[in-house]
Amino acid sequence: MRIVRTFDERFIHDCIAHKSVWPHITDDGSPDDPAFYFPPMVDAVHWLEVRDDEKRLGVFMVHPLNSICGEAHVALLPAAWGRSAEAARLAVQWVFENTAYQRLIVNVPSGNKLAARLATKSGMDYIGNNKNSFMKNGVVQDQLMFGISKEAA
């Protein structure tokens, strides 16, 4: 498995809009129809493709919070499930080796136990709770914040 930067907007869209992914990564502010989602394709956003040989397994997106701290998001296709932690560790490694980021965080809705487990399995520590900051299906939830610093990766 390896990580490469991608600019393939169609592939990025297809990962995010996949019927097995979309319901888990969207909130009430997202389009009802994933066909109306368009990934931000700007230089500051790093789209990282997960590959296994020639098979494309999904994407990670990292965007800046400031000059040394980025926030990550994940959209792994079902073919990568069961290997998500490996993909996440590789993505974290890629970020620290190829960007100026010294810190990487993720925000996980409190109801998404699988995403919280993935954050910890990728080496991230729980660092806080952003109360009442996410709405899914009309229900307000907390967001759990996880993070990792370059020296800990």
Image: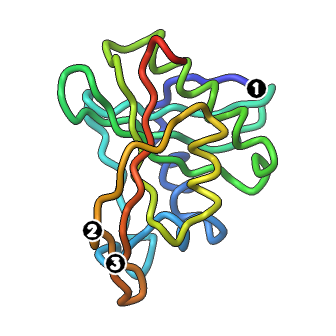
Q: Is residue 94 above or below residue 76?
A: above
Three-letter amino acid code of the residue under disc 1: Met
Distance from disc 2 to disc 3, alpha carbons, whole Å, reads: 7 Å
In the rendered view of the protein, which quadrant contains the C terminus? top right
Q: Which residue is mark 2?
A: 133
Name the residue: 64% across, 51% down: 117
Q: Earlier in the sequence, mark 1 or mark 3?
A: 1
Q: Return the residue nearer the eye: 126 or 30.
A: 126
Q: Position of residue 40 (x, y in %)?
A: 30, 46
Name the residue: 36% across, 68% down: 142
Q: Quadrant of residue 134?
A: bottom left
Q: Determine crowd level at label 2: few under 14, some 14-19, many 20+ residues with C-alpha closer than 10 A.
A: few
Three-letter amino acid code of the residue under disc 3: Met
Q: Position of residue 66 (x, y in %)?
A: 18, 29
Q: Which residue is mark 3?
A: 135
Q: Is residue 2 above or below residue 37?
A: above
Tell me the number on the disc at residue 152: none
